Amino acid sequence: MSNNKKNKKNNKRMNPETKAKIFQGIKTIISNNACRDAAREWKGGLQAIPVVLAVVATILAVVPTLTSQLNVQGSSAVYGSPTAEFDIGLCAFTHDLTHDENGTRRADADIVHVSWDDKGNMTTKNLDKIYTRDANDEVTHKWYTLKDNLHDVTIFEVFFSESFKDEQGNYKYTDDAFFKMLARNEDPTTGNTRTDSSIVSASYIAFGQNAISFRKYTSTIGTLEGRYDRLNGIDLANLGPAETVGYLTKDYKTTVAKNWVNFINLTYETTKVRSAWTFTGIMAGVDFGIILLFGVLLFVMTRGKNNPYRVVNIWETMKMAGWASFTPALLTLIFGFWLVQYAYLIFMFTYGLRMMWLSMKSLRPMAQ
């Protein structure tokens, strides 16, 4: 007897109204009329569904944008073609940290160390060993210079704000002021503009107190700024290959490039993540705002005196906008990874197209 009751319970059919609503909800994916009808007919707690769909649509629409932003590598800005002597400069700079001007490895006590602790604090040792010197071994500039001796021009420089502290040992410049001064081609020692034409187009790295700036001169000037917070345990003196690898050989260049790519990416990581989430948040706000905007526009467009949908209120048109948002978001998710450059535009275009079609066909004055 009890088994018969269980069988009857299991065989109980779904409520036709519930079944119809499920079918109608699925149909909203492709049918604008279903979006219109669901927005007008679904009452009670079911009215939360288009609101949830609008939120989900907003999230789906920005996933390709967020992913593409997080996949950006800072090293591409430095090592990307053309390199503007950055590759050669980094090889020479890395070599000179551990070798003197004759190419002889420095004694351990004379190696130039630039390292970071777990709090992102930079420590330097023997920076004066790589300062620019004249023929008499006198320091002319308190920064590293690499020259193209054939054409007598400077092609690469490395600056440390550490080298320009005041008499009390305090940093003379904030990182922002230091980077802007160098970008204006000003001498950080004197504050005067450097007039020597041989250094105007030299690419450089600037190590600030808490941040770093890479500036590459090509046909256009490219700048990348990063931070030290992820550099724990890194020492620039260790970015070169083993002594058995000949200087400027293919293996030497490959090893230095690999180590500096990792270094640059680490410095840019925090900035990249912040920028990615900021941009994504802005785009999410724009996309959700578009959904709200079209909800208002549908309300305004149905105010015509002879429009049979003049009875529709603004809450119902907002729900129509919510119901209609899911499919454009899904298309954005699918095609956004393929058309990465236009990922943030796909939702605007497809959603705008669907809403235009909805207003012209499903809410037109002659509709019944």
Image (cartoon, rainbow, N blue to C red):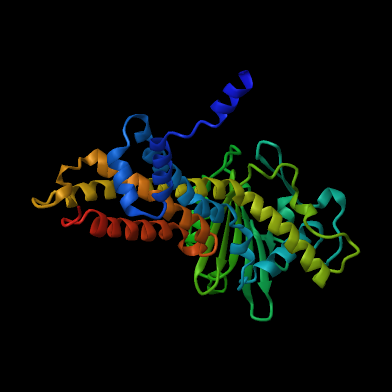
The extreme right residue here reads 244
Q: Residue at left 82%, top 60%?
A: 99
Name above or below for residue 172 compared with residue 107. Answer: above
Q: Residue at left 27%, top 41%?
A: 40
**100 with respect to 191 (left or right):** right
Name above or below for residue 270 compared with residue 8. Answer: below
**46 with respect to 11 (left or right):** left
Is residue 281 visible to us here?
no
Of the pair 201 and 232, the residue shown nearer to us: 232
Name above or below for residue 358 compared with residue 124. Answer: below
Q: Position of residue 161 (x, y in %)?
A: 59, 49
Q: Position of residue 119 (x, y in %)?
A: 66, 36
Q: Position of residue 306 (x, y in %)?
A: 9, 52
Q: Residue at left 71%, top 58%?
A: 260
The extreme front residue here reads 1
The extreme left residue here reads 305
Of the pair 122 and 58, the residue shown nearer to us: 58
Is residue 119 visible to us here?
yes
Q: Residue at left 71%, top 51%?
A: 127
State the image quarter where residue 313 is shown: top left
**17 with respect to 126 (left or right):** left
Q: Position of residue 50 (x, y in %)?
A: 37, 41
Name above or below for residue 152 compared with residue 181. Answer: below
State the image quarter where residue 317 is shown: top left
The extreme top residue here reads 2
